[in-house]
Amino acid sequence: MTRRFLMVPFLLALAAAPHAAAQAPTPQAAPAKVPFSRLKADFIEAYWRQNPESAVGAGYYKYADRLPIPDAVERRRSFSFASQWLRAFKEVDERALEVPERIDLRLIRGQLEAEHWYANTFKSHQWDPSNYNVAGTFGLLLGTEYAPLETRLRTVAKRLPKVAPYYAAAKANLKGPTLEHTQLAILQNKGALGVFGEGFLKQVDGSQLSAAEKARIKEDAGRAKAAVQDYITHLEGLETKLKASGARSFRIGKDLFEQSFFHSIQADCTAEELYRRALAEKEKLHARMAETARQLWPKYFGAEPMPADRLDLIGRMVEKLSQNHVTAEGFVAEVKRQIPLLESWVREHGLVELDPSKPLVVRETPEYMRGVAGASISAPGPYDPKANTYYNVTPLEGTAAQKESYLREYNEYILQVLNIHEAVPGHYVQLLHANKSPSLVKAIFGNGAMVEGWAVYSERMMLESGYGGNTPEMWLMYSKWNLRVVCNAILDYSVHVQGMTEEQAMKLLVREAFQQDTEAREKWHRAQVTSVQLSSYFAGYAAIYDLREQLKTRQGAAFDLKRFHEQFLGYGSAPVKFIRELMLSKP
């Protein structure tokens, strides 16, 4: 899972926080009189002014001293901004543009249309309290060395007094929240308290700011921390009421799911069509896994009778192989150890270009980011491409049994696939390439399904290249992991559209996807607090794989895998259907 600046509509909807202060500029001249390149540049600058939080995530710090206040006035201002720019771009004659610029135009239009839909139809700012958390941008400003510490602290100083009104607006926005999102918001905002804690105060004390500046920052930080705590207390009160009297369902229903899928996934299929493809793929995986399990059975179980039930057979073999894993204490260290090994394999086998000048830093997941995924990538934006990319790994917590369950899920085989997905040549490598895209639009208005799809595709591509020794054990466990991707889409649709219960979800995940109990329960939680995002993995992967196979058929012996990868990644994080159009337009 990625956490970065990408302006995916789903993530924008969660932010629900347009620009405070002066209104951003809107198009002044008729689009027909303005070159498209100029119109794009003007729009991007206006967009950052309107959305300074997202600008910081992209590495653009011009408006970093502004903390948006998510109240009704600013939502109306944001709506007006999007409406005016959407009208401007709808007047552009798409036929007069080259294919790459045509794709940029569609991306911008799609982004603005999505913002309208999320703000006015989806309305998660009313029912999802986890929308509101100031920690992310404060953490970036304090932890990214884009400027001297004193400059960054003065920027933070201008934002601190706005934390209290930010949370006041958040409380006023909430109308009928779900219990699950309320609980997630409590967890994550408790983590946010640490952003203004001892580490921050040490930064202030160690800076060259004047004594007066230091005192004011500390005083304002105290007020900001109190505002976060007040929001937590407010949510805890809501949680008690929701438990007693009932709450809005976390399920968004078929209509909202299909519309959200359309805006965020941007696929060539509907959500229901993807769901049905996932069901068919699950059956294919079960058949292949059963064949491999039969092959491996004598090696691990000798003369013991083989289970007649296919799922029992696969499950026994998966469980046997899952016993090989690192210790809880050595988990993060093992992740760090594997990264250079993956990089060496990619270079030696000529799979895709790497950039050793852009560091990958493995770290414990910051507390304000926990509660959704156990591993993720936080990548810099195109304006600050030299900044660190962080591989966030959540430390193992809980009882000994819970830790053992987690370690069996991320056993010696699966942990390698996880590192491929998150790091090399998955998210880390793809996002480095995205930052080099000649089209800033394609890098900024990225598509989550393309990003997740590439990471899933890279897993298969690595095993196809021989990584893991082409052993049946590695392929069986990879298939188990790939089954997770497929079942993500099944779970997502089933939960939000078909009303799947927790019991039914656990059967799917444990019985049919062979997941450990801890992993399955975390995935059930994730399905409750997100929607559509779990579908992005399979949607993107299927589209990328289909494109590769189409080009292999079309080019025959001339097909070059590395060239395909480089060309594909060169289009930034655009939706795969747009990249497909660009690649197929080439002779």
Image: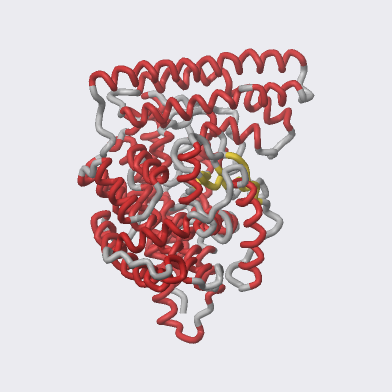
For residue 120, above or below residue 497 = above
- Residue 95, given in percent of the width and then of the height, sits at 37, 64
Please give left or right for residue 221 compared with residue 184 in the image.
Answer: right
Q: Please tell me in which quadrant of the rendered image residue 452 appears.
A: bottom left
User: Is residue 39 shown to the viewer in this render?
Assistant: no
User: Is residue 388 shown to the viewer in this render?
Assistant: yes
- Residue 241, given in percent of the width and then of the height, sits at 29, 17
For residue 157, above or below residue 404 = above
Residue drawn at point x = 68 percent, y = 39 percent: 146
Pick whichever, 80 or 140, lies toward us: 140
For residue 371, above or below residue 338 = above
The furthest residue to the bottom: 557
Residue drawn at point x = 37 percent, y = 27 percent: 182
Q: State how the image is colored.
A: secondary structure
Pick whichever, 127 or 330, lies toward us: 330
- Residue 450, given in percent of the width and then of the height, sits at 44, 57
- Residue 527, given in percent of the width and then of the height, sits at 34, 42
Pick whichever, 357 or 337, lies toward us: 337
Q: How many marks?
A: 0
